[in-house]
Image: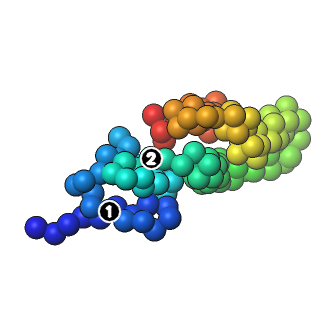
Amino acid sequence: MATTYIVDKDGNQADAAQLTVPSNRHFRGAWSLSGDIISEDLDVAKVLFKDKIREVRKPLLEAEDVKYMRAIEDDDSTAKSAAATKKTALRNAPAASAITDATTIAELKAAWDTDTLGDSPYA
C-alpha cells in the first residue's frame, strides 16, 4: 500500500496516517506541521480568506456594474445609488475588521459577510 504524505505551507511533509489534521480542508494552504499535529496558521488563513472573498465578489461586482449601467440608461438615481452602495460594500469586504480582529479559525469563518457576499463557503 502506498503512503500518502501531507505537505504543509512550508514544504514539510509527513505520513498522513500518522497525523492529526483539521476537520476540514478550508484552509489547507495554511496548514503547519508540528510533530504529528497539523494546525492552521491564522495569518496565512486570513490571506486565503480574503482571496476567497475576492473570488466570490468578482461576479457580484460584474452584476452590479450591469445594474448601474441600466440605472444610468433609465436615469434611475435610486437604482444607481443602490448599485453604487453594493459595489462599495463588495470592494470593502476584504478589509472588514472582523477578519483582522479574528483570533481563531472559527472567528475567521464567522467573519464571512453573508449580507454582502451570500452563503459562506465555510458553513
| Residue at position x 89%, y 41% in the image | 75
What's the amino acid at mark 1? Ala
What's the amino acid at mark 2? Ser
Q: Is residue 46 left or right of residue 9?
A: right
Q: Is residue 31 left or right of residue 58?
A: left
| Residue at position x 31%, y 46% in the image | 20
Q: Is residue 99 above or below residue 51?
A: above
Q: Is residue 103 left or right of residue 40?
A: right
Numbered mark located on residue 14 in the image: 1
Which type of secondary structure does the marked residue at label 1 adopt? strand
| Residue at position x 45%, y 34% in the image | 123
Q: Mark 1 vs mark 2: which is more N-terminal?
A: 1
How was the colour assigned to the protein in this rendering?
rainbow
Graded by Cα atoms within 10 Å as few (under 14), some (14 to 19) or many (20 or more), the crowding at tag 1 reads some
Report the front residue among 2 and 120: 2
The location of residue 92, given as percent across then percent down, is 77, 43
The location of residue 46, given as percent across then percent down, is 61, 47
Which type of secondary structure does the marked residue at label 2 adopt? strand
- Residue 74 lies in what quarter of the image? top right
The answer to whether the residues at label 1 and label 2 have Cβ atoms under 8 Å apart is no
The residue pinned by badge 2 equals 39
Q: Is residue 15 above or below residue 41?
A: below
Graded by Cα atoms within 10 Å as few (under 14), some (14 to 19) or many (20 or more), the crowding at tag 2 reads some
Numbered mark located on residue 114 in the image: none
Number of numbered callouts drawn: 2
Q: Quadrant of the N terminus?
A: bottom left
